[in-house]
Amino acid sequence: MPTTFGDLSRGIKRKEIDEAIARLGRKYLIFSGKGGVGKTTIAVNLAWSLAKAGNRVGLLDIDLHGPDLAAALYLTARLTAGEDGRLLPVEVFPGLWALTAQYLLSSDGEAVIWRGPRKIRAIAQFLEDTAWPKLDYFIIDSPPGTGDETLTIINLIKDLTALVVVTGHPLAIIDVHKGVTCLKQAKAKILGLVENQAGLICPACGETIATYPPENVQNLALKTDLPIIARLPGDPKATLMAESAQRPLVAAAPASLLALALQELAAKL
């Protein structure tokens, strides 16, 4: 008989995790069936926007094999523990605390080489054994696809709501469709689709150039019976401003069309 999730999660202290989760406020999973569609960038900018608005926000990176959250926050940090031995998330901005596996590694080139049971336990520890303050929002950046990490967080957090990130690229459409099917089978709540790279803002003239046929994501919305809750344009100028300032885009270029679209999406949460 094959090993099931239930077998692998027997050692998890369900009561302690439920008590920890109850302090985390509204919980959102930034999800996609495809890599490279902008999940981490969206997660960081949504969390920053919510914290800037006066909320207390937690940001958790459960992409254990490719943790990009530290780089997206332009922050090098090492995790420390409190007197009780629990991990202390890093306060990256007033009201915004972050935790990523990258903070556990000694260098950017070090890799996490873990299999299912250890990954499941690590994610449980990120919830149970971390001294998260009482939060208004908890944003979770997930790896692409429907592997152990995503299924674990859905299993552990029952009141989780997913935002599904997609681009109009045909391969992204195929993979995201499969991902949505998995979320529905897992009975996860889905707020809707977030179309990233929905056109490209020309740095010279400011006009928006189509990158993919708009009907690609529209057809996906029809097939999955999900609303498109945001269309985020590609904005090379604002992106360069963020990289130059080494700050999230909504902080470095708050008046840009992309930042305004991200702030509008944050307000919907």
Image: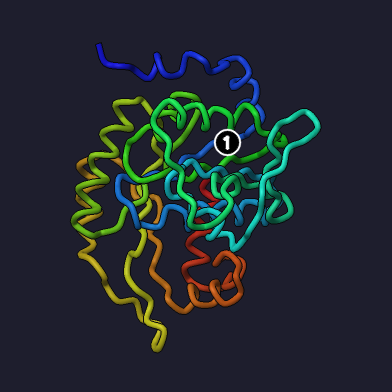
Total of numbered circles in the picture?
A: 1
Residue at 56 percent across and 16 percent down: it is 14
* Residue in view at x 19 percent, y 50 percent: 219
Q: Position of residue 156 (x, y in %)?
A: 49, 24
In front: 218, or 148? Answer: 148
Q: Nearer the viewer, residue 109 or 33?
A: 109
Looking at the image, residue 51 lies above or below residue 240: above
- Which residue sits at x=22%, y=48%? 220
Quickly name the residue at label 1.
26
**Side (left or right) of 133 relative to 199:** right
Q: Quadrant of the N terminus?
A: top left
- Colour treatment of the image: rainbow
Outermost residue, right side: 83
Does 250 sit left or right of 225 as displayed? right
On the picture, is 178 further left or further right than 94?
left
* Residue 18 spot, x, y in % from top left: 59, 20
Q: Inspect the image, locate mark 1, and give the three-letter code of the amino acid beneath it.
A: Arg
Please provide percent x and percent y for residue 212.
23, 66
**SS category of the residue bearing label 1:** strand
Residue lying furthest top in this view? Answer: 1
Crowd around label 1: few <14 · some 14–19 · many ≥20 (10 Å):
some
Nearer the observer, 95 or 205: 95
Q: Residue at x 47, y 67 (%)?
A: 258
